[in-house]
Image (cartoon, rainbow, N blue to C red):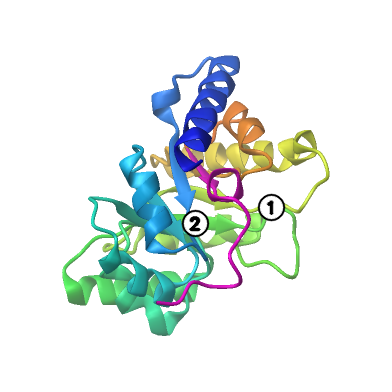
Amino acid sequence: MIAENIASLRARISEAAGRSLRRPEEITLVAVSKTHGPEAVLEAAQAGLTVFGENRVQEARAKAPLVAAPVSWHLIGHLQSNKVRQALGLFERIHSIDKVDLARDVDRIAGELGVKPKVFLEVNVGGEGSKFGFDPGALRVAMPELLALEHLSIEGLMAIPPFVDEPSEARPYFVALRELRDRLAGEFGVQLPELSMGMSGDFEVAIEEGATFVRVGTALFGERQGKAWKP
């Protein structure tokens, strides 16, 4: 079933890329494996996937050693400051730098470890009080300090838009993130090539609006297995 789902997702990614005059190779499918066990990750890896997204550091730390395949782990959920050191030892990319204090902590510990993590800045495009992320205006104000953090490689922006009934209703939020990225890149003279946006219900619209990473769980693995996977 997972292999069939991957084939279907790749076809849909290719079609969405074609509609926006892009190549499917420009889009990375992040398989959201949170709550699913290592056997599901291994099955997906054997079917050709290489990038897996986890929401919780502890769950990923327990799961990763049990996956006997060369895969890359991305943190897509909120990162607590007391988990930064663990996260830097596990994840290739962190999609969820959502405030300046967290960025400072990641920078400091990355310096201690001698690494330069690839990160995305999370933006609360819907202004929802229940979600993490920079307010767009506050992010612009914070950019000079963020760009001065020498141990971070800031690759782009990430967003989780408000829940909508129809995929097309998410389009304004994806447009807003892309336009914010373009403004910040132009104003500060930096390259911010990546946009992490789009999930199972709306990733095709996100691709049409410039997504380079789409985070897909349910359409790949099926419904979540509880709140978290435990060994």
- Residue 190: give x, y in percent of width and height: 39, 42
In the displayed orientation, state which residue is furthest to the bottom. Answer: 82
Residue 121 is one of the magenta-drawn residues: no
Q: Is residue 95 left or right of residue 223?
A: left
**Residue holding disc 2:** 121
Residue 227 lies within the magenta run: yes
The reply, left or right, for residue 183 in relation to residue 173 is left
Q: Quadrant of the C terminus?
A: bottom left
> Which of these two is toward me, 225 or 190?
225
Report the disc number at residue 113.
Answer: none
The residue type indicated by label 1 comes to Val
Name the foreground residue: 35 vs 85. Answer: 35
Q: Inspect this view and state whether residue 193 appears.
A: yes
Residue 109 vertical placement versus 140 (above, below): below
Q: For the image shown, how many numbered marks are present on the structure?
A: 2
Front in this rendered view, residue 173 or 150: 173
Q: Which residue is denoted by mark 1 in the rendering?
A: 125
**Residue 205, quarter of picture:** top right
Q: Quadrant of residue 86?
A: bottom left
